Amino acid sequence: MSAAGFPDDFVWGAAAASYQIEGAADADGKGPSTWDMFCERPGKIYNGQTGAVACDHYHRYPEDVSLMRELGLQAYRLSLSWPRLIPAGIGASNPAGFDFYDRLFDALLEAGITPYVTLFHWDYPLALYHRGGWLNRDSAHWFAEYTERVARAFGDRIKVWMTFNEPQVFIDGGHREGRHAPGDQLRFHEVLRACHHVLLAHGQAVRALRAHVRETRVGYAPVTLTYVPSPGEPADVDALRTCMFQTNSHNLRTNAWWIDPVILGRYPEDGLAYYGGEVPEIASGDLETIAAPLDFLGANIYSADFVRRDRGGKPELAPVPHGFPRSAFDWPITPDALYWGPRLLHERYQLPIVITENGVSCRDQPSLDGTVQDTGRSDFITRYLIELRRAVAEGAPVQGYFHWSILDNFEWAHGYKHRFGLVHVDYATQKRTLKESARHYADIIRTNGASLPDVEHGC
Ligand code: GCO
């Protein structure tokens, strides 16, 4: 452990995702994804924007890797575009797709940056969607086949893998709410069936990775819905724990329903009782498949809900105080989410934790002198990392932190309205500009956190 309070082998990185930065949406043999389809549907994306070009990372990756090297990133979390590699999702591979990732990985490794690869970050092959997508139990096998193919192709260089990014969001947002691709609003029992097939796919993919990648580390990157004490209230750990792991809603942005089966080998009892007859058929052997052992649990943590107890002593969500700091997305800025999230995740799941995403959307634009003075993001990083350091100091085995995102990029239904990048992207010219926060983060990386102020709390 360094004097700064982070382990000597702590990994400092940044993250992005294929559909959000690559562009080249129909170049060089890539097949269409559900996001390519969804972006074409009127009214679904802010100002009718799409990921067709995005940050043109597909062509500009050498410059982007060079910027990552300039920041001193030790690792870079990226996702593979399944339809760029296998245009129809199953069947013939696209050599140009494999060639792109070969070149990207070689550039990252040459720059001394370890790739952390997410197999799926939402850009689902459209051809498989037309075969039933996640509603079709074969989807688990399709995903396992894709996994085996990329494991065989890249496993000599890629040792750290995550299966899914935020399944809560692509299933709930994309199949219940309809706000994300493919834009479906299924009946709830169908949504739970799709969820079950995603979890089966996860388990089968873990097996495929272990079979075809020597000395691999395999994780999973759900979003972690986090809860913190309401400002001015005492830390009521039991209330936070209850809110964090209860399953009693038809909104599937929850934790236990998605993580318990993967790590504990069972669905949470309260959820099974609450969903009752809507729970899908769980075939013999399914839960064993899903619970294939993992090496770490990823956690995408941004903002938390406030918790207090009601008059009857029951935990309840408390309102956000007037004037409380918020991001451009209006998400409350709650640094202690990076204390309570890792602490309670480790308490329940007893696995090492990797913060696979944390960041803030700001309305960044270059000043007259060409610099991007995003001091709000620098302050955000400082405050959240002070809280993460507190969790580590109290025993949470956090192995790394990936800032979301390396580049401003396509923020799904919000198009390019929100900027999360450490690097500003002028989408008209594709000019990249390191923001002030990039240099701030570079100092933190260089000193393994020692440049963070020595204060008790970031809140
Ligand atoms: C998510 C996704 C990212 C988002 C980021 C900001 O967590 O929703 O993983 O793709 O862009 O989190 O919302």
Image (cartoon, rainbow, N blue to C red):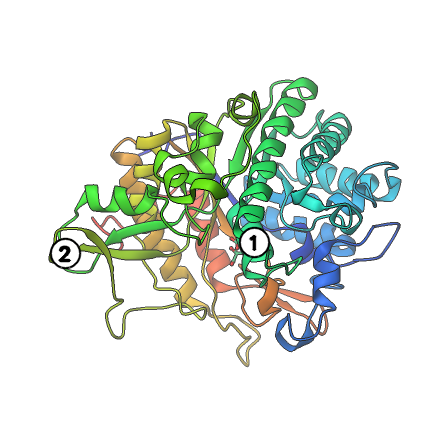
User: Mark 1 highlights which residue?
Assistant: 187
Does dot 2 land on a helix, a strand or a loop? loop
- Which of the 4 image quarters holds residue 163? top right
User: Mark 2 highlights which residue?
Assistant: 233
Query: Which residue sits at x=54%, y=23%?
Result: 292
* Label 2: how many Cα within 10 Å (few below 14, some 14–19, many 20+): few
Does dot 1 land on a helix, a strand or a loop? loop
* Residue at the extreme front of the image, as rendered: 277
Expressed as whole percent of the image width and height from the top left, the position of residue 11 reads 48, 36
Q: Is 109 left or right of 153, judged from the image as shown?
A: left
Nearer to me, 249 or 299:
249
Query: Which residue sits at x=34%, y=47%?
Result: 338
Hey, what amino acid is under mark 1? Arg
Mark sitting on residue 367: none
Q: Is 87 left or right of 148, judged from the image as shown?
A: right
Q: Is residue 6 visible?
A: no
Expressed as whole percent of the image width and height from the top left, the position of residue 239 reads 21, 46
Query: Which residue sits at x=24%, y=34%?
Result: 394
Hey, what amino acid is under mark 2? Glu
Expressed as whole percent of the image width and height from the top left, the position of residue 202 reads 59, 33
> Going from the N terminus, do you reach mark 2 or mark 1 first?
1
> Quadrant where the C terminus lies?
bottom left
Q: Is residue 196 visible?
A: yes
The CA span between labels 2 and 1 is 39 Å
Nearer to me, 158 or 142:
142
